[in-house]
Amino acid sequence: MTNSENDDNVDVDTNDLVLTSDIQKISSCERRVKVTISQSEVERYFQKEFNDLEKKAYVPGFRNGKAPRKLIEKRFRKDISDQVKNALVVNALTKMNQQSDFTPISEPDFQYDSLVLPDAGPFVFEFGIEVRPEFDLPEWKGLKIEKPVRDFSSADVDAAIKQILSEHGELSYKTEPAEPDDYIETKLTFKAGERILSSIERETIRICPTLSFHDGSINNADTLLTGVKQGDVVTTSITLKEDAADFEFRGKTVDAVFEILAVKKLTVPVLSEAFLERLNGYKNEADFRDMVLDTLRRQLEHEQRSQARRQITEALTVTADWELPPTLLKRQSEREFRRKILELQRSGYTQRTIQAHSNFLHQNNTEETARALKEHFILEKIAEIENIEETEEDTDLEIGLIASQNGLSPRRVRAHLEKAGEMDILRNQIIERKVIDLIFQHATFNEVPFDFKSLNEEAVDWAIAPDPNAIAEVTAEDLKAVNKEIDSKKKIDPNTKVK
């Protein structure tokens, strides 16, 4: 029997990988998996690669594809070991995913480059993985849910238009002392004793009762800042949240120093046809008011869903004692943050309101992430049982809503989401919304009045006590300085390279 005839009988079905696994439960959401692949299976994968290589391999002294099989195996075994290792690992993980009784929520935690195929014996590798906790889904049909409701009036639309106009207003300097709803330009410095934690060279802030940051808030900010004028320096204290990025200052009280650079007042535009055309091409005020009313209704819908998520979680997790590892909470916090921002964007909230929500999430990072993860686990399991999936039409609708609220094209929004790796967040959001709609169909409601959230908060996108080990972001000013340096050096030597 020739070599080629023997090779034709080699079983090369890599989709039927034989392996053994040992799965250790570390916690509700953590597993440690040990995978063992026998030497015979490893060799079968090598033979598959050799079968392909034999037809085209070049060995000196032989025509392409005519070298003896044993010579090919000896010469190229080391060269194809990475291909074999990759195929074994990928197929093993796929099979584990299909056959295991857990649902992964993260990628396997192991260093691929450190895995080595042995010269003899089985191929063994281990990895940690985070999984959805195992739980029996309580009865979710017939839940009693409080549902905020409101018949929006003309006055509600007027108030919303006033807020929109303020977003497009113009600031002008004033010499008189600052009043509530005026704006100040200020240099902000945050200190613990003489130690500077962070500083903002110039920030424009509206004077209102609450001034929030990522890791703390100043209450009675309007009392503090009313009456200030250019040149004044105002100092107050602020207690940082327990989720502050810098561990040393969690829960500590620090100083916030305001150096007033200017006082400004806001002039809002007149609701004219020219303004409406410039805003988003509205034909007349009636069309604009219809858009505002539609936005208010979507915001009400968002509040209904948000409150429903919380109530559903509380009802269905009464007996669920899930250990959520700190590493899981830390990694999922950014994902939950992005999910919430996308939800707010598609619901028509202004950037000012979104920033306030953003600061709330930052200040309550661990608690909010834990709650959101529990919500996600429950809704995901209902979606699996009820075969609920998203469609391309659902995705197009979500992207269209986000685009319309931000004055962008749907194509540009989609490109941004794909580049940022957020399309899966959007898909999960769609599925969870469908599940909540299904729960609504089987629920009984206690209607309660819906009140608008107060506009008494000004939110600054800033961490008072940032992580001291974090790498600072490159600013536009940094890039300008680098480019200026490159240009000046190239005038001297056109071939210069700046590191």
Image: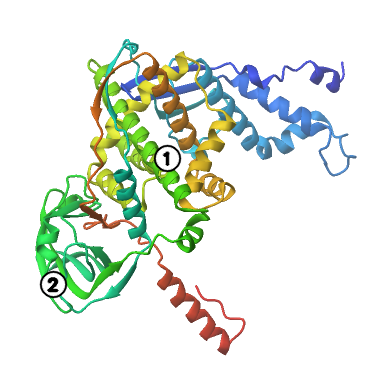
Q: How is the image coloured?
A: rainbow
Q: Is residue 482 left or right of residue 351?
A: right
Q: Which mark is residue 294?
A: 1
Q: Residue 56 carries which label?
A: none
Percent position of residue 447, x then y: 26, 23
Task: Pick whichever of labels 2 and 1 is earlier in the sequence.
Answer: 2
Which residue in the rendered view is the most extreme toward the right?
63
Q: Quadrant of the N terminus?
A: top right
Q: Residues within 10 Å of mark 2 (few under 14, many from 20)?
A: some
Q: What element carries label 2?
A: loop
> Is residue 140 positioned above or below 86 on the image?
above
Closer to the camera in the image, 324 or 85:
324
Residue 422 showing in the rendered view: yes
Residue at the disc numbered 2: 228
Percent position of residue 190, x then y: 17, 64
Q: What residue type is labelled 1?
A: Asp
Residue at (60% x, 33% y) in the render:
86
Q: Is residue 40 left or right of residue 2?
A: left
Percent position of residue 256, x then y: 14, 63
